[in-house]
Amino acid sequence: TGGHTTEILRLLSCLSESYSPRHYILADSDKMSEAKIRSFEQKRAETFSNSQFTLDRIPRSREVRQSWTSSVVTTLYSILYSLPLTYKLKPDLILCNGPGTCVPVCICALLLGLLGLKRAIIVYVESICRVETLSLSGKILYYFSDYFIVQWPALKEKYPKSVYLGRIV
Amino acid sequence: FRFKDSLAEELQRADLVISHAGAGSCLETLEEGKPLIVVINEKLMNNHQLELAKQLHRDGHVLYCNCSTLVETLQSMDLSTLKPFPPGQPEKFALFLDKAVGLK
């Protein structure tokens, strides 16, 4: 969604073409991100001739301030929905930065890993907006990601297993 | 203005920006190198949105006030005290990631 998309595209901006093909996963309710992504990929294709990407949508796992019990149900639904997609994509690397959308995908990737079907590296970058507290996705994925990156020193202190590289977006 | 796709044009022409504390607005303005006054409405906002505005203020990049003190702030402001906002460095992320996945 919105700010998350802008941030993640900035994160991608300096990556080499080794990180290809790129598979974008969006929430079904997200109206604006697709245009930003296509614009980014179009520019990229001008520099890298073999640039490839796909775009898929999954149900949004949770609306802002949605109640706890209904969030569990909608997240479970998103996880079940994402499982065939994640299995099909079998990602080597998952890069996410905080929207609820990323949690079901990461959980599916963890399941695939547990079942011995595919082990993905999960890299989570917390949003630049998060200076002193983590987002809910961050709090969950802090324990399940391989690399957890924060952009402000106060968070590095609170979450010692995180990586601090300064501001990267 | 109602809703425009992008305020980039207006932003380029502006000498001063007065904005709410939304991260996108703040960062876009600072990256354009424009002086920024952030107006906080504590009743409307949840705590996490304030975090970035507060930090940017602490680091000397923005001025900060609420609706009732805006006029006073405008009258007494000294924009020369604002520090330039260096851009983020996605290259550092790329370097880190290359090592993490074993590319380098």
Image (cartoon, rainbow, N blue to C red):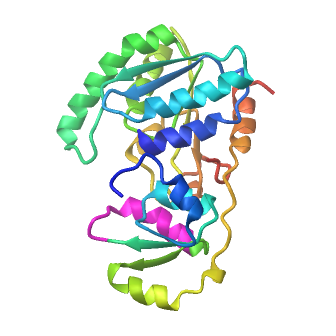
Q: Please, is residue B51 above or below residue B77 in the view?
A: above
The image position of residue B31, as x and y in percent, is 62, 58
The image position of residue B3, as x and y in percent, is 35, 51
Figure quadrant of the N terminus of chain A: top left
Magenta residues (range): B42-57
Q: Residue drawn at (45%, 41%), measured in percent from left and top?
A: A98
Magenta segment main secondary structure: helix
The image position of residue B49, as x and y in percent, is 40, 60
Closest to the observer, A66 or A161 = A66
Q: Residue drawn at (21%, 42%), measured in percent from left and top?
A: A68
Q: In this view, does A13 lie to the left or right of A3?
A: right
Q: Please, is residue A70 above or below residue B50 in the view?
A: above
Residue A94, image quadrant: top right
Residue B98, image quadrant: top right
Q: Please, is residue B77 above or below residue A10 in the view?
A: below
Q: Residue furthest right?
A: B104
The image position of residue B52, as x and y in percent, is 49, 62
Closest to the observer, A107 or B35 = B35
Q: In this view, does B78 lie to the left or right of B2?
A: right
Q: Please, is residue B94 above or below residue A56 in the view?
A: below
Residue B32 visible (yes or no): yes
Q: Does the magenta stretch include residue B53?
A: yes
Q: Does the magenta stretch include residue A23?
A: no
Q: Residue drawn at (23%, 36%), measured in percent from left and top?
A: A71
Residue A142 visible (yes or no): no
For the image, the number of numbered tags is 0
